[in-house]
Image: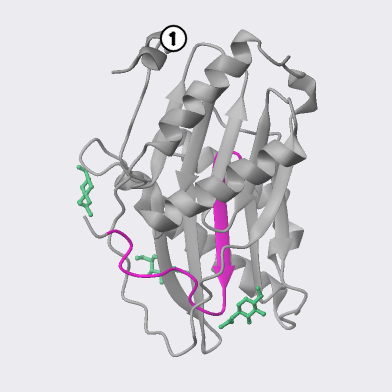
Amino acid sequence: MDSSSSVLKRLIWINFLAIQLLPISSELPLNTTNEYLNHKCLVSQGKYKPGSEYETHLNNVIKLLYSGSYRGFYLFGMSNDNAILQCRADSYGTKCHDCFATALAVLRRKCPWYKGMIIWYDQCLLSITSKDTIGQIDYDNNFCMSNAKKLGGDKLAFTRTWKTLMDNLTTLATATRSKDNYTMFAAGETSYKGDMMYGMVQCTYDLPATACKECLVFNSLRFQDCLSDTRGARFVGGTCTFRFEFYPFISKPVLNI
Ligand SMILES: *[C@@H]1O[C@H](CO)[C@@H](O)[C@H](O)[C@H]1NC(C)=O
Ligand SMILES: *[C@@H]1O[C@H](CO)[C@@H](O)[C@H](O)[C@H]1NC(C)=O
Ligand SMILES: *[C@@H]1O[C@H](CO)[C@@H](O)[C@H](O)[C@H]1NC(C)=O
């Protein structure tokens, strides 16, 4: 361990192992772009000063993140500041590293000197905070995006379908959350009126399974209008996300361990 590690009160390094996807028959080309989704400077946590202890800590955390092998989930925590890098389960190795490097560069530009900041991409979430948030649901930093194309037709039946899909995937993701295969991700598919509908759920690995469920249910109720009657939508948050599309959007294999 180098000297930088001595300032860390604790360091948790967890490899994120993903479950095998249900086989997806893909005729459509897969979207492999890593779209920028959103960012948030956590203004209420204030700013740090150049040369401060906070800056030193932050730089150490960033160094550690840079040296990772990018299997998927990293949490670097201290009592009052921590960073989470959560890559999507099919983004590991170079993809996860590239997503992290982009996320960090953009975040530092958009939120200069902020102690707390979060940025979301398709393939990763990078969250840096001056509060101890490990294992806790993030109720504050959530948003929803939906396809402009309306589905039309039976809104209730469609709501029932995405809810069931989300519930099924949540059960799968949380059931496989264990020390053996550090995962909180599941992807799958169902059919809706003859079309294949693809979905995924993911929670940050630090959440307990029950909190993961609660996080997903909370957001699905909050964003119900955004999720219903659309040909693709997702809510994205600091600790959980759900997405569905009418095309496959997860690469396989999910993880080549
Ligand atoms: C890929 O994403 C773009 C928008 O980001 C969407 O217009 C396009 O339909 C997607 N590709 C497929 C195969 O659906
Ligand atoms: C959810 O799981 C049940 C039981 O495995 C299955 O019958 C159902 O088709 C699934 N529904 C969706 C929408 O995934
Ligand atoms: C993950 O771990 C759980 C609990 O130990 C186990 O039931 C499940 O089969 C494992 N999944 C995989 C893909 O290894």
Amino acid bearing label 1: Val
Q: Residue at x 65, y 10 (%)?
A: 52
- In this picture, is 169 found above or below 176? below
| Quarter of the image where one finds residue 193 | bottom right
Q: Is residue 78 left or right of residue 69?
A: right
For mark 1, what is the residue?
A: 7
Residue 237 in view, yes or no: no
The kind of secondary structure the magenta stretch mainly shows is loop
Question: Which quadrant: the N terminus?
Answer: top left
Colour mode of the rendering? one colour
Percent coordinates x, y for residue 211 in the rendering: 49, 34
Percent coordinates x, y for residue 126 in the rendering: 56, 40
Q: Residue at x 30, y 67 (%)?
A: 253
Is 241 a magenta residue? Answer: yes
Work out whether residue 220 or residue 237 is closer to the camera in this orientation and state it: 237
Residue 228 in view, yes or no: yes
**Residues rendered magenta in the picture:** 237-255
Work out whether residue 108 or residue 11 is closer to the camera in this orientation and state it: 108
Is 202 a magenta residue? Answer: no
Percent coordinates x, y for residue 80 in the rendering: 56, 13
- In this picture, is 231 found above or below 253? below
Percent coordinates x, y for residue 192 in the rendering: 54, 81
Mark 1 is surrounded, within 10 Å at the Cα level, by few (under 14), some (14 to 19) or many (20 or more) other residues, namely few
Work out whether residue 25 or residue 125 is closer to the camera in this orientation and state it: 125
Can you tell me whether the CB of the residue at mark 1 lies under 8 Å from the nearest atom of ligand 3?
no
